[in-house]
Image (spheres, grey):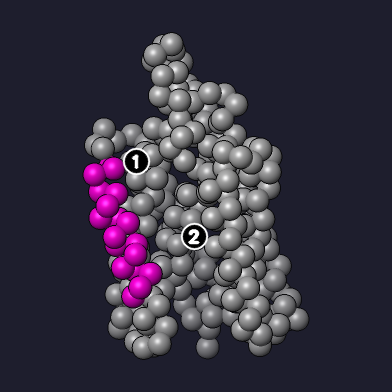
Amino acid sequence: MDNLQSPFAQQYQSPMAVQNMVAAAMKRVYLNMFLGLLVTAFVSMACANSIAYLEFILLNRWAMIGLIIAEFGLVIGISSGINRLSSTVAMLLFFLFAAVNGLMLAPIFLVYTGASIAKTFFITAGTFGAMSIYGYTTGTDLSKFSRILMMALIGLIIATMVNMFMHSESLDYIISFVGIILFVGLTAWDTQKIKQMAVGMPADQIGRLATIGALSLYLDFINLFLYLLRFFGDRRD
């Protein structure tokens, strides 16, 4: 992501011009992220209303594993190939990822009530919005926390994999609490990082930044939502 930035371009622009350019780039990032969330919501709700799909995904474990592999493949493909892909192709791959994630999330409607899912979504939106604004406006360099955040993310992944075999409800709640704190922090850090990348960026690179930035913030939002759902979601009887 870092090689998208043109560090020498900003010296030829006035501070106001740079500020306007960054604001325009961030608007595109948030728009793409919002559209990605809409795709995920539409696909997940459509699939949740399909008995045939739910039976298929629940009875065929390989299908869920295939979706997980597809998600990882798309994230790696977009992230590693962002400089080789055209802006249009990168954006289409991002929306494809959002659709695949919608397929993954459809079963949560069988576990939690629709009202509690909607409630958690709005709680997530408020939390995400507050931390993203903080990351955008703060003068503190959040990169100094990056190593801690990445180490915490690795620890969270390992703990989650361990608990897949332990099935510990107590550990599950601890993981969820840590996950909330982690993705709150990542939201602020990713926002600041995207803003810094947008400074002095050539106009022909903004489309790629809008896609890779949207992907980062989309992942922060979805993970924060899923961890909050453990606490605010009302399970069906």
Rounded to the nearest angstrom, the CA distance separating label 1 from label 2 is: 18 Å
Mark count: 2
Residue 145 on the magenta span: yes
From the viewer's perspective, tell me whether residue 6 is left or right of residue 28: left
Can you tell which mark lies on residue 210? none
Whether residue 130 is visible, yes or no, is no
User: According to the image, label 2 marks what residue?
Assistant: 222
- For label 2, the SS is helix
Q: Residue at x 50, y 43 (%)?
A: 213
Residue at numbered disc 1: 135
Q: Residue at x 57, y 38 (%)?
A: 83
- 183 vs 218, left or right, is left
Q: Which of 223 and 108 is in front in this view?
A: 223
Image height of 25 relative to 188, above or below: above
Whole-percent x, y for residue 116 in the image = 50, 70
- Crowding around mark 1 (Cα neighbors within 10 Å: few <14, some 14 to 19, many 20+) is many
The three-letter code of the residue at mark 1 reads: Gly
Question: Which image quadrant for residue 123?
Answer: bottom left
- In the rendered view, does 208 fall on the left or right side of 124? right
Determine if residue 83 is in view.
yes
Q: How crowded is mark 2: few (under 14 residues within 10 Å), some or many (20 or more)?
A: some
Q: Earlier in the sequence, mark 1 or mark 2?
A: 1
- Where 207 falls versus 162 (above or below)? above
Q: Which is the main secondary structure of the residues drawn in magenta?
A: helix
- For image coordinates 25% across by 48% down, the residue present is 145
x and y percentages locating residue 140 in the rendered image: 24, 37
Disc 1 is placed on an element classified as helix
Q: Give the range drawn in magenta.
A: 142-159
Disc 2 marks a residue whose amino acid type is: Ile
Residue 64 on the magenta segment? no
- Whether 76 is drawn above or below 31: the answer is below
